[in-house]
Image: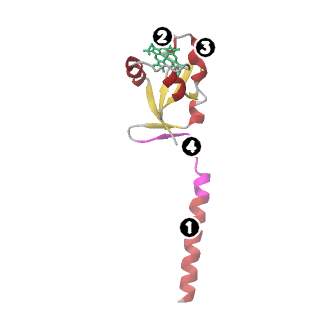
Amino acid sequence: MKNLYIITTLIFWLAIVFFWLARSWLPISHDVIYSDSVTVYSLSVVAKHNKRTDCWMAIHGQVYDLTAYLPQHPAALRVILPSCGAEASLAYDTKNRSKEHSDTADTLLKQYEIGILSH
Ligand code: HEM
């Protein structure tokens, strides 16, 4: 009976170690996760899209591809460009100078959503 207990415990821990090791061997990227209806991006993925010709932002947990919108944005490019590739909630909420964007801006923003930010 004691042997059975020892063997079962051993198998249990071997299984735990196996799955733990297998997890790091498997070629799964945790940077981009696809679920049925939504794509989840890490901030390190968003950070790669940090230029005028390829501009993503994370705003309040959503990820937006704003590349097409940049030329239409009313303020100078230098105002919005630093937010490309960044967590830009504060910049969006304040326009970098304690002023909120309008409801029109919020509606526009929705059009550019491509996924959500991972925690
Ligand atoms: C995250 C960085 C951003 C910054 C720092 C920023 C800043 C500004 C500034 C300085 C203005 C012009 C001055 C003013 O109207 O008060 C402005 C206007 C505007 N921005 Fe942005 N913006 C950002 C992102 C966005 C995004 C992502 C959208 C929409 C997709 C957007 C939509 C608009 C619109 C529609 C206006 C006209 C005024 C309004 O409706 O509030 N902006 N923004």
Q: Is mark 2 within 8 Å of ligand 1?
A: no
Q: Which residue is mark 3?
A: 78
Amino acid beneath label 3: Arg
The Cα–Cα distance between marks 1 and 4, rounded to whole angstroms, is 23 Å
Q: Which residue is mark 1?
A: 15
Crowding near the residue tagged with mark 3, few <14, some 14–19, many ≥20 C-alpha atoms within 10 Å: few
Q: In the drawing, what numbered circle is on residue 29?
A: 4
Q: In the drawing, what numbered circle is on residue 72?
A: 2
Crowding near the residue tagged with mark 4, few <14, some 14–19, many ≥20 C-alpha atoms within 10 Å: few
Q: Nearer the viewer, residue 6 or 94?
A: 94
The Cα–Cα distance between marks 3 and 1, rounded to whole angstroms, is 54 Å
Q: Position of residue 64 (x, y in %)?
A: 48, 26
Q: Are marks 4 and 2 in contact (CB under 8 Å)?
A: no
- Which of the two labelled residues, at mark 4 and mark 2, occupies the earlier sequence position? 4
Q: Number of labelled discs? A: 4
Residue drawn at x 62%, y 58% as measured from the top left? 21
- Which of the two labelled residues, at mark 2 and mark 1, occupies the earlier sequence position? 1
Region rendered in magenta: 21-35
